[in-house]
Amino acid sequence: MQQVNSNQAESILGISWEDEVPFGRILNLTTDTIQKINLTNYQLRYRINASAERICLGYRPGIGNQEEHSTCTKILEKGRKCDSCTRKDQIFAAGLHHAHTRDRGSLSAEIISHLERPNYLYIAIFGDGSIKVGTSTARRIGTRLLEQGAFFASIICETSDGFIVRTLEDMITSDIGLVQAISTKRKMKGVLHPVSHNKLRETLNNARDKVSDFLGNLPLKGYSMILDNWDNPAVETTCWKKVLKYPKNLSSGTHDLTIVSICGRIGAVQREAETEFYATDLDEIFGLIIEPGHFPPEDFTIQGELF
């Protein structure tokens, strides 16, 4: 059991994955230090007042080091990041996303260096059956899929660089119709009302075969087929077999929860002395200044969802 001092104030700045384990980056505002804490079985006990302030979530200081984040402790008036961190993230994101459509002479040396590495093209399926196509450096593929909360995935091919993989990604979206992003709303639906794993695998395999046939007929070079399967170890745990929607928003009130498992940024949590598992979007709390401690939990009732 983790003990916390209720006189302290802290903020969870996000999740990072290491060896399939989710770690929280937790800022202690009393000592102005950031700790990396395993969030599996982490006790999320805290309260938030109506005027709670937010801490900037920072930015990723180098596109070649996606596990690292800047330390930015600015108090925000609005949004999730300060103007400076937002600009830095947007510059990197825009440079990477559109690099394959631009003249290489217009790109920064950092982006070119990053994109000259081998990359993987993958397709991933989520609990509701939604499928997306995506890309990742070879080194981060497992971490990337865990971050996104995919249930299963197929790593389609390896490319010689990031320019080719993004070209292939756009072609698959245009010609086959696979999207490049899945909303958190759909991911939440997938954990609350999941399609059977056998059906998900069948749907993914059918999509994989279409993508494989498409790539096999392209008059392009610079990639080789892999067709490896990836399974998210979290979705096989008992807590995801039957999970209810946590009826409260994490960004206000009093909460007494234990994080049992995490899929992407959706946490499976339990209340003290209860056997039910609840699904909640942990992003609701990221950056908020909370008062940790064991406070009397608020009552709530579970209502059926309307479709």
Image (cartoon, rainbow, N blue to C red):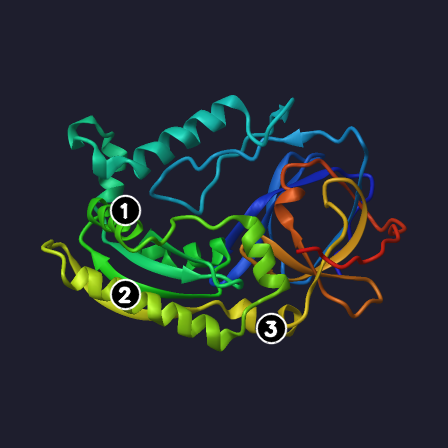
Residue type, mark 1 in image = Asp
Crowd band around label 3 with a 10 angstrom C-alpha radius: few (<14), some (14–19), many (20+):
few
Please name which of the two marks, 1 or 3, marks the residue nearer to the observer.
1
Q: Is 100 on the left or on the right of 72, as rendered? A: left
Residue 163: percent from left, percent from top? 21, 44
Res 38 visible: no
Considering the numbered disc 2 on the image, is that residue within a helix, a strand or a loop? helix
Closer to the camera, 305 or 114? Answer: 305
Crowd band around label 1 with a 10 angstrom C-alpha radius: few (<14), some (14–19), many (20+):
some
Q: Which mark is on residue 237?
A: 3
Considering the numbered disc 1 on the image, is that residue within a helix, a strand or a loop? helix
Q: Is 33 on the left or on the right of 44, as rendered? A: left
Please name which of the two marks, 3 or 2, marks the residue nearer to the observer.
2
Whichever of labels 1 and 3 marks the residue nearer the N terminus, that label is 1
Residue type, mark 3 in image = Thr
Residue 268: percent from left, percent from top? 66, 61
Calculate the distance from the C-alpha at mark 1 to the C-alpha at mark 2: 15 Å
Res 165 visible: yes
The residue that disc 2 covers is: 210
* Quarter of the image where one finds residue 77: top right
Please give the name of the residue rendered at 27% of the width and 35% of the height, measured from the top-left corner. 110
Please give the name of the residue rendered at 79% of the width and 57% of the height, measured from the top-left corner. 303
Crowd band around label 2 with a 10 angstrom C-alpha radius: few (<14), some (14–19), many (20+):
some
Closer to the camera, 79 or 211? Answer: 211
Closer to the camera, 202 or 276? Answer: 202
* Quarter of the image where one finds residue 201: bottom left
Where 202 falls versus 43 (above or below)?
below
User: In the picture, which quadrant includes the N terminus?
Assistant: bottom right
Whichever of labels 1 and 2 marks the residue nearer the N terminus, that label is 1
Please name which of the two marks, 1 or 2, marks the residue nearer to the observer.
2
Q: Which mark is on residue 170?
A: 1
